[in-house]
């Protein structure tokens, strides 16, 4: 989402590590998945002259879950 008045780009669901995780589980995904996404983000930063880039969540795709650690007492 682009907040034009403040030149802020809000991004969610980047899922770094998704391609690797999927390939490990037999689902073919390009190795360039994250690089392509980051290149698109870079182009937006340059084109929109952003003052801020905000990642809202789901930055990583992983089996680790902090809720599991809290529940297990880890």
Image (cartoon, grey):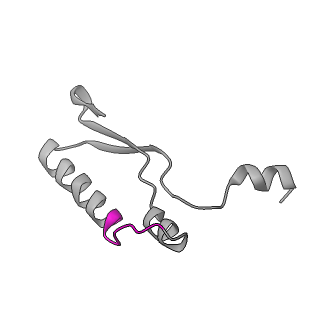
Position of 62 with respect to 2 (left or right) is: right
Residue 65 in which image quadrant: bottom right
Position of 61 with respect to 19 (left or right) is: right
Q: Position of residue 11 (x, y in %)?
A: 37, 43
- Residue 43, compared with residue 18, is above or below; it is above
Disc count in the image? 0
Query: Which quadrant does the C terminus fall into?
Result: bottom right
View extreme (front): residue? 26
**Which residue lies at the image location 52% right of the left edge and 67% below the top edge?**
21
Query: What segment carries the magenta color?
Result: 27-34
View extreme (top): residue? 5
Q: Nearest the camera: 3 or 36?
A: 36
Position of 23 with respect to 36 (left or right) is: right
Query: Which quadrant does the N terminus fall into?
Result: top left
Q: Position of residue 32 (x, y in %)?
A: 31, 69
**Which residue lies at the image location 33% right of the left edge and 64% below the top edge?**
33
Secondary structure of the magenta portion, mostly? loop
**Which residue lies at the image location 26% right of the left edge and 52% below the top edge?**
41
């Amino acid at each position: 989402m682009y907040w034009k008045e403040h030149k802020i780009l809000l991004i969610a669901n980047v899922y770094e590590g998704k391609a690797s995780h999927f390939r490990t589980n037999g689902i073919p995904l390009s190795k360039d998945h994250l690089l392509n996404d980051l290149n698109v983000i870079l182009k937006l930063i340059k084109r929109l002259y952003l003052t801020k880039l905000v990642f809202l969540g789901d930055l990583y795709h992983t089996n680790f879950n902090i809720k599991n650690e809290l529940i297990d007492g880890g």
